[in-house]
Amino acid sequence: MSRHTSKVRSPLYGSRRPSDPGQEFGAVNPDAARQRSARRTALIAGGVVIAVAAGGVVLVPHWTQTARSPSKAATASVSSAMVRRTDLSDSVSMDGTLDHGSPRAINSSSTGTVTWLPAVGATIRRGHPLYRVDNRPAVVFHGSTPLYRRLDTVGMVGPDVRVVADNLRALGYDIGVQPPAGALVAPSRPDAAQESAGSEESEGARKSGGAEESEELGEAKGAEATSGSSSPAASGSPSPAASSVPQRVQPGDSVLTQGLMAAIKRWQRDTRVPETSVLEPGDVVVTTGTVRVAQLKVKNGDAASGELLSVTGTGKRVTVQASEGDSSAFRKGNTVEVTLPDGSALPGRISVVGTMIRSGSEEGGDAGSNPTRTITVVLDEGRKGTAAVRSVDSAPVQVRFTGRTRKDVLVVPVGALLALSEGGYAVQLRDGKLIKVTTGLFAKGLVEISGSVTAGTKVVTTS
């Protein structure tokens, strides 16, 4: 068989002869092999470039088994989603402050020297002293009306008497029967009230002393009551607020009956103060509930004048300075979600929507800042949230308010929307068909849609 030295036509490279006349076609020339490899690489790379320019689609050849495939990040992932019917709500998140609320100043109603104060952070419940003046306790009662007068006369009527009656009953004291609303009550002279509400020993002595002794006792007490030489507190004379004119009991009132005065005396005995059956305004501090001591304004030994301390409620609350532009999300009773500093989230509800609108300059901000109003949120702590909330006295939090809500609407993921060249949006079915839709509320990665679509339809979306 003769050697083959004729032309070889390659479909890709054309005709060529061996560069060395003495080289056989099947022999390998290392230099020529390297040249051919370089030419092949250049031509194939050039073919890829042409394909990109002409068709816009790149088919990447596998040069070797170790060639890398295109990155997943470079290719959009497409999947399908189902059109579903649900409720959709948008929300807005705002900065808030978790604390015990605004402190309330407690002023002394007595004159004298401060002899005892609680510790900051202490919790003071009903029936316990909040402070002492001249070693006489000022005890916490719950209510909305402070004691504004001396309660010393049977038949006195008012909301302050109601506070005393409600609290003594809550503390376990029998106050007797109260006249109903609408009844007419005539105040009695205080000495008669003292006799009726006095101890059993005094009452027994009156019964055994005979009529003559009772008359003498009554005359002596009457003279003492009409004497102007002693103060009301010392003599037992009626307070200036007491009137001899009959009063009608109004809803929310109570009457200082003999039974109630007897209960006051028993309570005084238990609290180790003089048993007079009479209450002075300084004997009681009326609060809306259990309080927490926020700050002390005086020290033991200081004069009991002006503000002695400040208190807050014991429960935590969140306050938010909300812009007027977001007012649609702020309605009393709306539920919210509060994110604490540790990342845990607790439900809450709006309890107060402030009616006072403040400018930015009033809040210490720029004069051009948007006006704000204060929103108060109470937390639904529950068993889990209590520990997280108790761990801080004050902290910044995030509050998510629910805004607009659409009930029972069709929704799809936002990634299912396709913008149309003529305007508007469409969704694409799995077979490629486009259906034009009208969009509504966008929230939580979903969008409300309407049009020729039904719940359960599968549409194409990005994932």
Image (tube, rainbow, N blue to C red):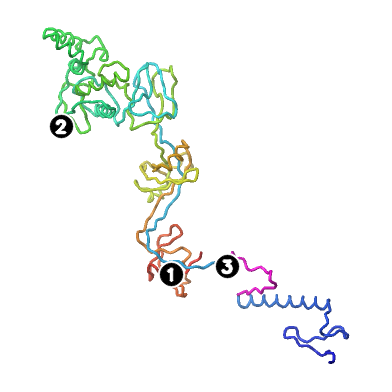
Foreground disc of the pair 3, 2? 3
Q: What element does badge 3 sit on?
A: loop
Which residue sits furthest right? 22
Q: Is residue 73 above or below residue 321?
A: below
Instruction: Tell me, yes or no, if residue 361 can be seen here.
Output: no
Badge 1 amino acid:
Lys
Identify the residue under disc 2. 182
At x 48%, y 39%, the residue is: 395
Residue 256 position within the rendered picture, expressed as x and y whole percent measured from the top left: 21, 24
Q: Which quadrant holds the N terminus?
A: bottom right
Indicate yes or no whether the magenta region holds residue 312: no
Residue 390 position within the rendered picture, expressed as x and y whole percent measured from the top left: 45, 37
Q: Is residue 337 above or below residue 105?
A: below
Mark identifier at residue 75:
3
Between residue 49 and residue 393, name the one nearer to us.
Answer: 393
Q: What element does badge 1 sit on?
A: strand
Badge 3 amino acid:
Thr
Q: Is residue 198 above or below residue 169?
A: above
Among the two numbered marks 3 and 2 on one chain, the one whose residue lies closer to the N terminus? 3
Foreground disc of the pair 1, 2? 1
Label 1 and label 3: CA atoms lie apart by: 22 Å
The residues colored magenta run: 57-76
Between residue 387 and residue 284, name the one nearer to us.
Answer: 387
Mark identifier at residue 301:
none
Mark identifier at residue 458:
1
